């Protein structure tokens, strides 16, 4: 595969796994004094956004697969990357959205993580693209690259989160 196409293809699995630990691991619900944090902690819902993201990723994966069979793999991969970007923007701007609209922080963050789950569900489309484009003798290597992108996301997500936490405190990202 051409270099830029491979970079785009691998950025979906990498960002999906990286943000699982980078953003979801730093959600401010349990103890930063934000409205609703104590309530969510008492109800045991501090991990709910991660679970919601995973559930939506599970539910939307076959949907994106069917759509990619109908209209092609590339548009779905690009749509997934665009949607993930929008979810990052919503998550990063949650305090501003709260101030401008009066919508609570918790619903905004749940919405952001829901978007991430829906649009990161296109990872199976990336795998299908590799299976479609590469010849059988190179297919295992392509799938290995997708697995490596997952692995890098699992390693670098917590590392980035910890580094930013040390540099700027728990409210930095």
Image (cartoon, rainbow, N blue to C red):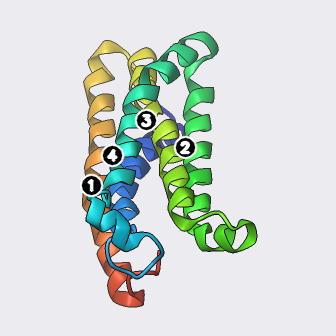
Q: Earlier in the sequence, mark 2 or mark 4?
A: 2
Q: Nearer the viewer, residue 53 or 42?
A: 42
Residue with the mark numbered 1: 154
Q: Secondary structure at mark 1?
A: helix
Q: CA distance from mark 3 to mark 2?
A: 29 Å
Which marked residue is nearer to the observer: mark 4 or mark 1? 4
How many C-alpha atoms fall within 10 Å of the one at disc 4: few (<14), some, or many (≥20)? some
Q: CA distance from mark 4 to mark 1?
A: 17 Å
Q: Secondary structure at mark 3?
A: helix
Q: Secondary structure at mark 2?
A: helix
Which marked residue is nearer to the observer: mark 2 or mark 4? 4
Relative side of 120 to 155, left or right: right
Residue with the mark numbered 3: 56
Q: CA distance from mark 4 to mark 3?
A: 9 Å
Q: Looking at the image, do the residues carrying marks 2 and 4 touch, with CB atoms under 8 Å apart?
A: no
* Image quadrant where residue 45 sits: bottom left
Residue with the mark numbered 2: 4
Q: Residue at x 60, y 44 (%)?
A: 83
Q: CA distance from mark 1 to mark 2?
A: 22 Å
Residue with the mark numbered 4: 51
Instruction: Report x, y in % for residue 32.
Output: 38, 81
Instruction: Report x, y in % for residue 131.
Output: 38, 18
Q: Earlier in the sequence, mark 3 or mark 1?
A: 3
């Amino acid at each position: 595969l051409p270099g830029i196409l491979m970079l785009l293809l691998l950025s979906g699995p990498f960002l999906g796994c990286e943000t699982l630990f980078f953003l979801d691991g730093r959600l401010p619900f349990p103890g930063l004094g934000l409205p609703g944090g104590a309530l969510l902690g008492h109800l045991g819902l501090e991990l709910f956004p991660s679970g919601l993201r995973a559930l939506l990723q599970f539910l939307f994966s076959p949907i994106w697969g069917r759509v990619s069979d109908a209209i092609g793999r590339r548009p779905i991969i690009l749509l997934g990357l665009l949607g993930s970007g929008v979810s990052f923007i919503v998550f990063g701007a949650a305090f501003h959205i709260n101030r401008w609209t009066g919508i609570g922080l918790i619903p905004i963050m749940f919405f952001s993580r829901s978007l991430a789950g829906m649009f990161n569900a296109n990872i199976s489309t990336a795998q299908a693209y590799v299976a479609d484009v590469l010849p059988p003798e190179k297919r295992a290597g392509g799938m290995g690259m997708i697995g490596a992108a997952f692995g890098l996301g699992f390693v670098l997500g917590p590392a980035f989160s910890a580094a930013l936490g040390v540099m700027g405190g728990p409210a930095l990202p």
